[in-house]
Amino acid sequence: MAEKSLYGYRVEPQDVDFTLRATLTSLGSSILNTAGQDAYGKGFGVDVLNAENHSWVLSRMAIEIDRRPEQYTDYTIATWISDYGRVLSTRNFTLSDAAGGEFGRAVTQWAMIDLTTRSAVDLSWVGREHNDAVVPVPPPTERPRKIREVTPTRTTEHRVVYSDIDFNRHVNTMRYVEMMLDMLPVEQLTQDFPVRLDIHFLKECRYGQTLRIGCEERGQAVLFEISGDGTTAAVRASVEWKRPEE
């Protein structure tokens, strides 16, 4: 029976902010790097898919971080696939410190696209050929929440440049998150309260586009919407910090 895979990391200087704790985006990058490493090691990474003109793309993601580890802290990410569907595959993660204490978790849902048409393809074959990679353990937290509507009270714009683009030639996931978080006060971003991020990808954003990023505060959450054409949502997200008094 398949087991969870473990990958070791260290919080390096480029991963922290001026509080000397890892940023949410650096931890998110480690989570996504883990997904790529594990898929590659199990024989269904982007190298194999690219040979068939296909690639993995992230459809939805939820990250929960209870506390941000300090600079030079070692930590481990465990990952496992809990299910394959025709359209989406669910990959899960837990983050633990050197003493084995869990301080974070994530649930991601992935689609496969044709690199020519940019449309989703049936990934049932992956489930059939790599069924031995499925670990019968449920996701460690609630699956990514859908954000159905955002009514921005503040907006900004960002032109997509070279450094925003990933190997699929669209905007990198954590660049989207950085664009959104940059709209918030620095005092809010550096507080060390538990935080949950949900992000839902609806359309690709490509090099040269001018993105419109909108922000709405709703209760204890901050909601975001990014549009690549000024009208249709390409990305929606929610960030929520859990303060001690709540």
Image (tube, rainbow, N blue to C red):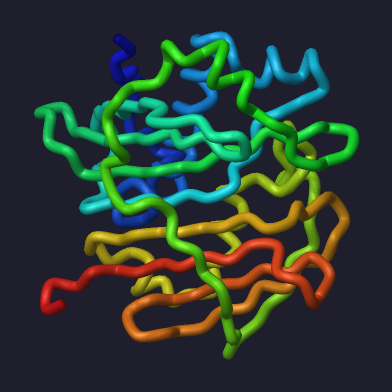
Q: Residue at x 52, y 83 (%)?
A: 216
Horizontal and vertical percent for residue 88?
57, 39
Instruction: Measuring from the top left, give residue 24's x and y in whole percent.
Output: 40, 52
Q: Residue at x 30, y 25 (%)?
A: 136
| Residue 153, x across and y down, in percent | 58, 90
- Along the viewing direction, whichever of 36 and 91 lies nearer the viewer: 91
| Vertical arrangement, residue 176 with respect to residue 138, above or below | below
* In the rendered image, the vertical position of residue 5 relative to residue 198, given as above or below: above
Query: Can the viewer see residue 175?
Result: yes
Name the quadrant containing residue 124: top right
Q: Quadrant of residue 53?
A: top right
145 w.r.t. 108: above or below: below
Residue 3 point in image, percent of width and height: 29, 15
Where residue 105 sits, quadrant-wise, is top left
User: In this rendering, does residue 181 appear at all?
Assistant: no
The residue furthest bottom is 153
Query: Is 62 in front, or is 17?
Result: 62
Tally of numbered discs? 0
User: In the picture provided, is 212 more to the left or to the right than 39?
Assistant: right
Q: Residue at x 77, y 72 (%)?
A: 232
Where, quadrant-wise, is the N terminus in this rendering?
Answer: top left
* 189 relative to 30, above or below: below
Relative horizontal placement of residue 115, taking residue 31 as reference (left or right):
right
Identify the residue at horizontal 44%, vertical 76% (top origin).
222
Quadrant assignment for the C terminus: bottom left
